[in-house]
Image (cartoon, helix red, strand yellow):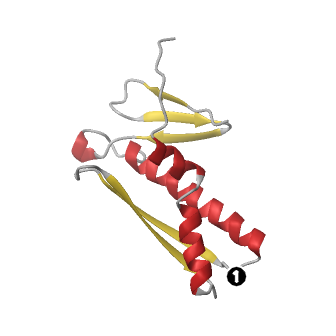
Amino acid sequence: MAVATARIGETRYATTITTGHHALTADEPERLGGADAGPAPFDLLLSALGACTAITLKMYAERKAWPLEALEVRLHYHGGETPPRIERVLVPTGPLDDAQRARLADVAERTPVTLAIKGGVPIETSLG
């Protein structure tokens, strides 16, 4: 189970996020009134998707003993489109054949964060 807490105070949009023993800062860019002290919320969303994709595909390649030396996951959020979409480009490094490369792309479509985003995870909001 994942757990996170986000706190904002008097600094305009800077938000401290804690999850486990990790701390992150999120903010808006200067053009939106922030101080650019950390990634913006959609940048964090893309980061989560990229990390999940990279980790899942690395684990899959290890289980299959495939020669995946490195993987770059390039992500772009197209929020101005109707409907909005995320573009994901996988750039694997290593002597993989075409079938292995295609399988990695197929597995990427079923990573946990991919499925959560595509499935539209319900959010229940309450006051504490």
Camera-nearest residue between 116 and 75: 116
Question: How far from the left and from the top, in percent, is residue 111?
Answer: 58, 55
Classed neighbour count for the residue bearing mark 1: other residues with Cα under 10 Å, few (<14), some (14–19), many (≥20): some
Q: Is residue 18 above or below residue 102?
A: above
Question: How far from the left and from the top, in percent, is residue 18?
Answer: 58, 34
Q: Is residue 36 above or below residue 14?
A: below
Camera-nearest residue between 34 and 90: 90
Question: On the rendered structure, is 93 left or right of 123?
Answer: right
Q: Is residue 117 above or below residue 77?
A: above
Q: Where's the N terminus, which quadrant?
A: top right
Q: Amino acid at mark 1?
A: Pro
Could you tell me which secondary element the residue under label 1 belongs to?
Answer: loop
Residue occupying image coordinates x 75% and y 73%: 64
Residue occupying image coordinates x 30% and y 39%: 34
- Look at the image and tell me whether residue 127 can be seen: yes
Question: On the rendered structure, is 109 left or right of 32?
Answer: right
Residue occupying image coordinates x 59% and y 73%: 103
Looking at this view, name the residue that lies furthest to the top.
Answer: 128
Residue occupying image coordinates x 62% and y 79%: 100
Camera-nearest residue between 26 and 50: 50
Question: On the rendered structure, is 74 left or right of 84?
Answer: right
Camera-nearest residue between 22 and 59: 59
- Total tally of numbered discs in the picture: 1
Q: Which residue is mark 1?
A: 67
Question: How far from the left and from the top, in percent, is residue 112?
Answer: 59, 50
- Look at the image and tell me whether residue 40 can be seen: no
Question: How far from the left and from the top, in percent, is residue 41?
Answer: 40, 42
